[in-house]
Amino acid sequence: MNTGTRAEPRTAADTLVDAGLLSLCRSALDSYPGGLLIIDASDRPIMVGPRSDSLTAALDRAAAEEARHASGASGMAPAPADGLPVAMPGPVRALAERARGDGAAVEEIVSLPGETGPTWFRLSLLPLECLEPDCEPGRLLVLARDVTLERTLRAALVDSRQRYKDFVEISTDFAWETGRDGAFVFVSPRGALGYPAQRLVATDPASLVAEYFGPGSIPFHAREPVEDVDVWLRAATGALACVRMSATPLYNAHGEWSGARGVGRDVTRERDRDAALARARNRERILAYITRAIRDEVNPTDMLATAAETLGRGLGATVCQVFRVPETDDAERPTAGPGEGATAATADNGEGPPLTFVPGARWGDLGYMAAGPVLDRLRQRRGRLEVEIGDWSIMAAPTVYRHALNGAVVLWREAGRGPWSEDDRLLIGEIASQLGIALEQIANHESILRMSRTDPLTGLFNRRAFFGELERRHRRLERDRSPASLIYLDLDNFKVINDRSGHQAGDDLLLRLRDVLVGNTRPTDLVARLGGDEFAVWLEGADTSVAQAKAEILVTAARALDEAAIGGDKPLSLSLGLAVHEAGSGETLAEMLARADAAMYAAKHTGKNAWRLAPPPGGRGGPAPDSRGMEVKA
């Protein structure tokens, strides 16, 4: 500190004598570890101790800044004209005024400017008593100790503690501590799980625990450190909350357990999200498996059977049934089990043809007919349906393609196994969408198959499909040694009708003939249009007498076609050739076809409008009869 210019330096002892402070010892002043000043009544230093350099430098900087602010100039303030040191800065003057006013010592920590930042001093100002008559009153002893490091460390400690506290509050929902009796002795101010902190203190945390499957005792009573263990606690609302805890035990100097300390974080939502994600992945896995199973199957029946089994197993069902809605009444329908058939229901508005469900595939032992009431409700609802019938809990969903209902899937589960879950509902909706596509693909496949096997005009088997089916049935005849008959038919004078009335009239006659043939045969028989006006009928299990009777019926029924055609001098009629299979004859299919063809041409060449029975294979036996009692030569 700048103390002015003196003619002769004065010692501390000389100053004390001048001040009348003979009671102070020279050695005490010299040994004081901090800064030391004596200031007069004008707050100017009149004595500086030996260890006061940092103090005087800080006082000079403070006084200079005050002078600079007051004058608007820069740099150090000039020394007074009388050559005495500059006065104390404002904070010190304020303390001096208090000390003089109170007549007692004052102490305060004051910030003064340092070389690199604020410097903190603990200042103690003590009034000095005048012992000499000419002593100037108002002098003060100033003792200073640099506490900058102490304050910095304290501030750093406070900041560190606050930082740690912030981290704990951010990373956890609550912190806690239990005492040796196991009850809470501390809970962070925010409380926990809806409980105020004050309510939890002195409460046994075991009363909050609903489930704990971790190691050892509950974390609140931990004897060993635990980390990230899940504890299910009862919240203030009564709901269960999963809290992930870490805790460490507390032991006293004697090694006795005195409580535990730890933190907890509510992870209920996190676990719910993880569980939901796991369920979604499981649904995706099941859906992918079913989709792959459907895609890998070529046969439509196997495709639906695989879908029914995988869906039933994937959703924990006992029975899974898949139904289809045929495109037309003529659509081929999958075969139902014994005593089972399709279920039908009228349209929602009660108008139009009934909406028919036919069996597609099933997994499980329950018959299709049991699903009738469910399908009726499903048709009306047109959305996912859950019902209970008897001991069954049932969930059903429609399958849709391009907004058109094309089937349904019905799942059955014993009612005692509990209700269907939300995951089950989501999964059946996703799978129903895939099944809707699969059913449409199957319908398209069957449509293409029908087109390749049927005659486009009459809808009967075409030549290729008819002969393919005949080969299969003929092989079975040899194995079963059962009878069967083949009839070849040809329309007489059909070309005349085409020439006179046009091809549309001819097509109409062919459709009428189709109706005659279908109306006079059984579902187990085969009826085909071989081309043009040639047809064929396979009578399953028919012997000679049955075949002859059927041929007579067809010839008679065909005469009505002539009345519709108005053939005139060229009447429309049928010529039929019959060939009956004899078990054990060894006749090939080609030979049987040739016999039926020869018998038909014999009927045409002998007057038409008649039937002829081909002789037995190999020409054995007598003449073969016909509708006029005429013979047909082999």
Image: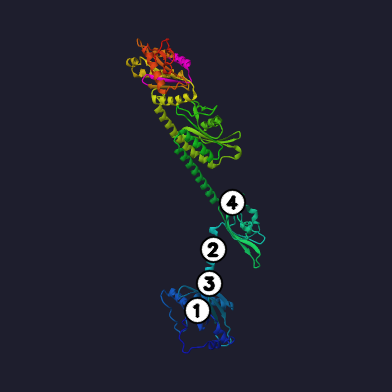
Q: Quadrant of residue 195?
A: bottom right
Disc 4 vs disc 1: which is toward the camera? 4
Q: Earlier in the sequence, mark 2 or mark 1?
A: 1
Which residue position holds label 2?
Answer: 164
Which residue position holds label 3?
Answer: 151
Disc 3 vs disc 1: which is toward the camera? 3
Disc 2 vs disc 4: which is toward the camera? 4
Instruction: Name the residue at 52% across, 37% down.
Output: 309
Q: Is residue 377 visible?
A: yes
Instruction: Name the residue at 55% across, 62% down.
Output: 165
Disc 3 vs disc 4: which is toward the camera? 4
Q: Position of residue 582 (x, y in %)?
A: 46, 19
Q: Residues within 10 Å of mark 1 (few under 14, many from 20)?
A: many
| Image marks 3 and 4: residues in contact by CB distance under 8 Å | no
Residue type pointed to by label 4: Ala
Up the image or down, 94 lies above or below 302; here it is below
Q: Give the spatial CA distance, label 3 vs label 1.
A: 17 Å
Residue found farthest to the left: 499
Which residue position holds label 1?
Answer: 55
* Visual colour scheme: rainbow
For the residue pair 609 and 509, the one nearer the viewer reads as 609
| Image marks 4 and 1: residues in contact by CB distance under 8 Å | no
> Could you tell me which secondary element the residue under label 4 belongs to?
strand
Q: Give the spatial CA distance, label 2 vs label 4.
A: 26 Å
Q: Magenta stretch: give its range.
A: 531-554
Up the image or down, 556 lies above or below 342; here it is above
Q: Position of residue 119 (x, y in %)?
A: 49, 74
Asked if residue 156 lies left or right of residue 509, the reply is: right
